[in-house]
C-alpha cells in the first residue's frame, strides 16, 4: 500500500472515535458471557441453522486466504499502528472458521475451535483487549501484487459518470426505512425524473451491458458456491482486466446494483403485482419482509457500508475529473493518490462483494439464517467500513490538496491571460462581461436597481459600461455624490451613441469569511443603488478579483472602469474625473480626461467647482477670498481676527471660508461649532461637502498620476501637492482675488503675513495689495525652509514610484506609515531599500 496512506492510517488508527472501530476493540459478537458460569464462550450462528442447511454447506477451509491474510512478522504493521499479525490474532490458526466466515458469510463450519475458548485465539486475543485492525499494510502488498497481475489495460477509456449516476439512483431507492411498517418505501415511479444522465448511460450500455451481466452472475455464483472474498475479487478483476481502475470499480458496482436493485424492487412491488409476487416467493422476499424488524440492524450496517463504498467511488472519480493541463503525477498529492487508488478500488470491491453476499445469504438461506448471524455479519461489515473510510479520508485530503493546486494554477493562468482579453478585438462586449461577472448562462447575474429585479447580462450588450468596483465599505458620502452625478449625466447623455450603464461589482476578499453581517451590508448597499449591481459577491470568481487588482490596481477604494460597446477599455479608472468634473466628464474616457486637463488653469473654481453658490458669488464680485483649514481652534481664532484687521486697515473686501480637514471628522465638527458660535467666519455646515472638497483635491493628484502628468513643470500639480501637504501638517490658508489664487501656505506663514501688515503696507501704493501680500509671504516662506510630506494609502491603488518636494524640489524619501483608524499621528518608519 502507498507509504503515505500507511503513515496516515498510523496517525488515525488508535485515535479514531469511530463507533465501527469500537466493534473491533470492544466486545466481539463471537464471544459472550455465560450468566451461569461467568465464563466466555463462542457463539456459533450455524448451530441455529436447520440441519439440512448445515449439511448443504459443510466444512470449508481456505489456505490461500490464510496465507494472504495470516502472515506473521509484518514490518508494515507498525505503520498502521499494529503489533504482531492481526489476522493471526483475530482469526486464529489454519482452518479457523472465523476466517472462512469473513471470506464467505454463507459458510461457517462448526469446528471445536469455535466452541472452545481455550483453542480459539481470536477470543483469547479480544479478551486481552488487543486493539488491532484485521487488515494490515503487508497484507495489502501481497494482495495488490495479485491484483496488479490482472491489470492489463488496452487503452479502453470509459466515461463512467453517467453509469455511476444510474447506480446512485438504484441504491438511493433500494433501501428500508424504520418509519414504514413494511420497512420499504413505496415510490411512485411516475414521479421520478427522466434525468439527462440516463440517456447518456443508454448509449454506453450498448457495449458494456454484457460485462455488467457477466460480473453480476459471477458475483452471485461465487457467493453461492463458497468462494471467499479475495478469490471472488480476483475473479472479477480478471473480467475487467482491460479497463482502467475507475471503470473496474463502477462496472463492478453496477453489477451489484443490478442484483441488489432487483431484490428491493421485488420487495417494493410484490404486494401489488402478481408477477413480482411469484418471483418474490422464489427469492423468499415475503418471508424476509415479514421478519424485517429483527433484520433491521443487519440492513442498517449494510446501508452504511454501501454509503461508504459510494462515497469512495465518487472520490476516485473526482481524481479523473481533475484537468490534466493544471495538474500531473509529479504533484505530490496526485502521485500519492494515484498510488493509493488501486488499493482503494480493491477494498471497495471487497465491500461490494460483502454486500452482495449479505443479500445472497438472505435469499438463498432465508430470514432465519439472517437473524441468527446478524451480530457476526455486522462485525464483519463494520471492519470493512473502517478500512474503506480510512482510505476515503486519506484520498479526500489528497483531493483537497489537488484542488488547491489546480485552483492556484488556473488563477495564475487566468491572471496572465487577462490583459490579452483587452488587446483582442471583439464584436461586442459580452465576452468581456461574461469573464468579468459570470460566464454562466443559467443564472441571472445582475440586479436592476430601478426595478429591483434580477436580469441577464444581455441588458448590457453593445452599451458603454462603467464598472463601479469597490468593497462593502463605500461611505454614504461617496454613494450620495455618485448618485447625484449619475442622475445629472443620465439627463445629459441622451444620444443613442452615448448610452451607458453603471454596474456595481462588489469585491470581497476571498481569504475573509463572508458573514451574515457582511451580507446584510451588501444587500443594503445594493438596494440603495439606482444602477445595476452584481446580484451577489459570490458570483465573481476569485481569479477575476485578483486580475482586477493586477490590471486596475484595485485595493479597496472605489474605482470606475469604463468599457466601450466592444468591451475595449476606455479608462482604467474614471472615478477621479467624475469627482473633479462631475457630469461634465461624460463620457468618462481617458481622452476626455486629457482634454479637460488641457482646458484647466490654477484657479479657485477648480477647487470649489459648483459645490457652494456663496463662494461662486464672491468670485463673480471679484472679492478677496481666503480659504483656510485645520483643526487648531486657537490658530483659527488668531488667523481670522488678524486677517479681518488687515482687510479693514487695507480697505479691501475680504471673505473667509473654513473648509476643514481631510481627516479627523470629530475635530472638524468641534471647530465648526466654535466658528459658528463665535462668528469667526463662513463655513460649510455639512461635513459631506468638506469630505468632497478633499476627495476632489486628492483625485486631481491621482488623475495626473494616472495620466502620467505628475511632473514638476506642471503648475497645477505643484500647487495641488502643496495643498495636500499643508493639510497633513496642520493649519493652512489659501489667499485669492476673485478667481485668481494669489498664494497658499502653512498656517505659520499665512498667520504672520497679515500680522506684519505694518511692515509691508508701504509697498501697496507701488506694488498693489496683491503683489505686496504675496511678496511678504514668499519672503517668510523662504526663511521658514518648509518641506512637504504625502501619505498614499495602499488601498489607493496607483502609487508613484518617486516624487519631488513642491517646496524645495528635491527628491523625497519614501516612508512606511502606520496610521490608526482614529486619525492619530502615524508612526513613520523609513524604507531602507
Image: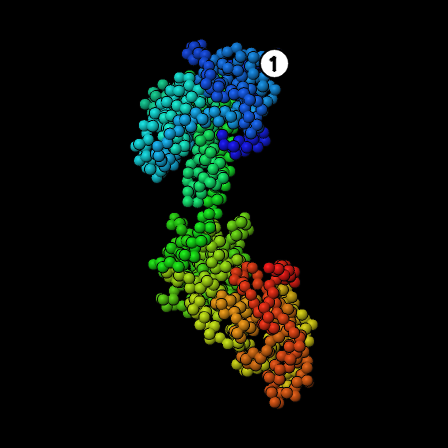
The number of discs equals 1
Q: Which residue is nearer to you in this view: 265 or 407?
A: 407
Q: Which residue is nearer to you in this view: 562 or 479?
A: 562
Q: Is residue 799 visible?
A: yes
Q: Is residue 501 visible?
A: no
**Placement of 651 over or under 556, stated as above or below:** below
- The residue carrying pointer 1 sits among few (fewer than 14), some (14 to 19) or many (20 or more) residues within 10 Å by Cα, namely few
Judging by the rendered image, the residue that carries numbered circle 1 is 39
Left/right placement of residue 737 relative to residue 348 reads right
Q: Position of residue 271 (x, y in %)?
A: 37, 24
Q: Residue placed farthest to the front in the image?
A: 833
Left/right placement of residue 13 relative to residue 413 reads right
Q: Position of residue 757 (x, y in %)?
A: 67, 83
Q: Secondary structure at mark 1?
A: loop
State the colouring used for the structure image. Answer: rainbow
Place residue 654 in its image quadrant.
bottom right
Q: Residue at x 55, y 18 (%)?
A: 122
Q: Residue at x 41, y 32 (%)?
A: 245
Q: Residue placed farthest to the bottom in the image?
A: 765
**Placement of 409 over or under 217, stated as above or below:** below
Q: Position of residue 742 (x, y in %)?
A: 58, 79
**Placement of 309 over or under 676, stated as above or below:** above
Q: Residue at x 59, y 78 (%)?
A: 743
Q: Which residue is nearer to you in this view: 765 or 333?
A: 333
Q: Residue at x 33, y 23 (%)?
A: 274
Q: Position of residue 254 (x, y in %)?
A: 38, 29
Image quadrant containing the C terminus: bottom right
Amino acid at each position: 500500500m502507498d507509504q503515505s496512506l500507511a503513515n496516515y492510517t498510523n496517525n488515525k488508527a488508535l485515535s479514531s472515535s469511530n463507533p465501527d472501530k469500537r466493534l473491533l476493540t470492544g466486545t466481539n459478537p463471537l464471544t459472550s458471557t455465560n450468566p451461569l458460569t461467568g465464563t466466555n464462550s463462542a457463539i456459533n450462528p450455524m448451530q441455529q441453522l436447520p440441519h439440512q442447511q448445515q449439511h448443504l454447506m459443510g466444512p470449508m477451509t481456505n489456505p490461500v486466504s490464510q496465507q494472504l491474510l495470516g502472515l506473521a512478522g509484518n514490518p508494515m504493521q507498525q505503520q498502521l499502528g499494529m503489533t504482531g499479525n492481526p489476522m493471526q490474532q483475530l482469526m486464529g490458526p489454519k482452518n479457523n472458521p472465523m476466517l472462512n466466515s469473513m471470506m464467505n458469510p454463507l459458510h461457517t463450519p462448526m469446528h471445536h475451535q469455535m466452541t472452545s475458548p481455550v483453542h480459539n485465539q481470536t477470543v483469547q486475543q479480544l479478551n486481552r483487549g488487543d486493539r488491532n485492525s484485521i487488515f494490515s499494510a503487508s497484507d495489502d502488498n501481497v494482495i495488490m501484487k495479485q491484483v496488479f497481475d490482472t491489470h492489463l489495460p488496452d487503452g479502453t477509456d470509459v466515461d463512467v459518470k453517467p453509469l455511476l449516476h444510474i447506480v446512485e439512483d438504484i441504491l438511493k431507492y433500494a433501501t428500508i426505512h424504520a418509519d414504514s411498517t413494511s420497512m420499504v418505501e413505496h415510490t411512485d415511479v411516475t414521479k421520478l425524473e427522466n434525468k439527462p444522465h440516463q440517456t447518456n448511460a443508454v448509449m454506453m450500455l450498448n457495449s458494456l451491458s454484457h460485462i455488467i451481466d457477466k460480473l453480476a452472475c459471477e458475483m452471485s455464483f461465487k457467493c453461492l458456491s463458497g468462494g471467499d472474498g479475495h478469490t471472488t475479487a480476483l475473479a472479477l478483476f480478471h473480467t475487467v482486466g482491460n479497463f482502467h481502475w475507475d471503470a473496474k470499480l463502477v462496472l463492478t458496482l453496477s453489477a451489484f446494483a443490478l442484483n441488489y436493485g432487483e431484490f428491493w424492487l421485488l420487495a417494493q412491488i410484490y404486494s401489488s403485482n402478481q408477477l413480482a409476487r411469484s418471483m418474490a416467493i422464489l427469492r423468499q422476499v415475503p418471508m424476509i419482509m415479514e421478519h424485517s424488524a429483527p433484520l433491521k440492524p443487519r440492513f442498517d450496517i449494510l446501508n452504511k457500508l454501501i454509503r461508504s463504498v459510494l462515497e469512495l467511488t465518487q472520490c476516485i472519480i473526482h481524481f479523473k475529473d481533475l484537468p490534466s493541463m493544471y495538474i500531473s503525477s509529479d504533484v505530490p498529492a496526485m502521485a500519492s493518490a494515484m498510488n493509493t487508488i488501486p488499493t482503494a478500488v480493491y477494498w471497495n470491491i471487497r465491500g461490494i462483494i460483502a454486500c452482495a453476499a449479505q443479500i445472497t445469504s438472505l435469499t438463498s438461506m432465508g430470514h432465519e439464517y439472517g437473524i441468527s448471524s446478524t451480530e457476526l455479519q455486522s462485525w464483519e461489515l463494520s471492519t470493512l467500513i473502517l478500512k474503506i473510510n480510512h482510505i476515503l479520508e486519506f484520498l479526500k485530503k489528497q483531493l483537497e490538496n489537488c484542488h488547491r493546486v489546480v485552483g492556484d494554477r488556473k488563477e495564475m493562468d487566468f491572471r496572465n491571460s487577462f490583459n490579452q482579453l483587452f488587446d483582442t478585438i471583439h464584436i461586442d462586449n459580452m465576452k468581456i462581461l461574461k469573464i468579468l461577472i459570470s460566464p454562466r448562462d443559467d443564472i441571472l447575474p445582475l440586479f436592476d436597481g430601478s426595478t429591483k429585479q434580477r436580469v441577464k447580462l444581455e441588458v448590457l450588450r453593445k452599451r458603454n459600461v462603467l464598472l463601479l468596483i469597490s468593497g462593502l465599505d463605500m461611505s454614504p458620502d461617496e454613494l450620495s455624490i455618485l448618485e447625484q452625478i449619475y442622475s445629472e449625466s443620465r439627463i445629459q447623455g441622451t444620444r443613442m451613441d452615448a448610452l451607458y450603464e453603471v454596474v456595481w461589482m462588489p469585491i470581497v476578499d476571498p481569504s475573509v469569511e463572508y458573514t451574515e453581517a457582511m451580507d446584510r451590508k451588501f444587500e443594503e448597499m445594493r438596494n440603495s443603488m439606482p444602477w445595476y449591481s452584481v446580484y451577489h459577491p459570490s458570483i465573481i470568481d476569485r481569479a477575476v478579483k485578483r486580475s482586477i487588482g493586477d490590471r486596475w490596481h484595485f485595493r479597496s477604494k472605489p474605482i470606475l472602469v469604463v468599457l466601450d460597446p466592444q468591451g475595449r477599455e476606455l479608462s482604467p479608472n474614471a472615478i477621479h474625473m467624475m469627482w473633479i468634473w462631475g457630469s461634465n466628464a461624460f463620457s468618462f474616457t481617458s481622452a476626455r480626461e486629457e482634454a479637460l486637463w488641457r482646458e484647466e488653469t490654477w484657479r479657485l473654481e477648480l477647487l470649489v467647482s459648483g459645490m457652494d453658490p456663496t463662494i461662486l458669488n464672491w468670485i463673480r464680485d471679484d472679492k478677496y477670498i481666503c480659504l483656510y483649514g485645520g483643526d487648531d481652534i486657537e490658530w483659527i481664532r488668531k488667523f481670522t481676527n488678524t486677517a479681518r484687521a488687515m482687510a479693514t486697515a487695507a480697505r479691501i473686501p475680504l471673505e473667509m471660508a473654513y473648509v476643514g480637514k481631510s481627516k479627523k471628522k470629530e475635530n472638524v465638527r468641534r471647530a465648526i461649532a466654535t466658528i459658528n458660535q463665535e462668528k469667526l467666519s463662513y463655513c460649510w455646515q455639512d461635513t459631506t461637502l468638506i469630505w468632497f472638497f478633499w476627495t476632489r483635491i486628492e483625485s486631481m493628484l491621482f488623475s495626473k498620476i494616472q495620466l502620467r502628468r505628475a511632473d514638476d513643470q506642471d503648475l497645477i500639480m505643484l500647487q495641488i501637492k502643496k495643498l495636500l501637504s499643508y493639510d497633513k501638517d496642520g493649519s493652512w490658508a489659501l489667499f485669492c482675488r476673485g478667481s485668481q489664487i494669489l498664494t497658499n501656505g502653512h498656517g505659520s506663514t499665512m498667520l504672520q503675513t497679515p500680522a506684519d501688515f505694518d511692515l509691508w503696507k508701504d509697498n501697496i501704493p507701488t506694488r498693489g495689495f496683491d503683489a505686496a501680500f504675496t511678496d511678504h509671504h514668499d519672503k517668510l516662506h523662504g526663511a521658514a525652509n518648509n518641506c512637504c510630506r504625502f501619505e498614499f494609502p495602499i488601498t489607493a491603488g496607483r502609487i508613484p514610484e518617486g516624487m519631488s518636494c513642491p517646496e524645495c524640489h528635491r527628491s523625497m524619501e519614501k516612508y512606511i506609515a502606520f496610521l490608526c483608524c482614529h486619525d492619530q499621528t502615524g508612526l513613520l518608519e523609513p524604507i531602507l531599500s
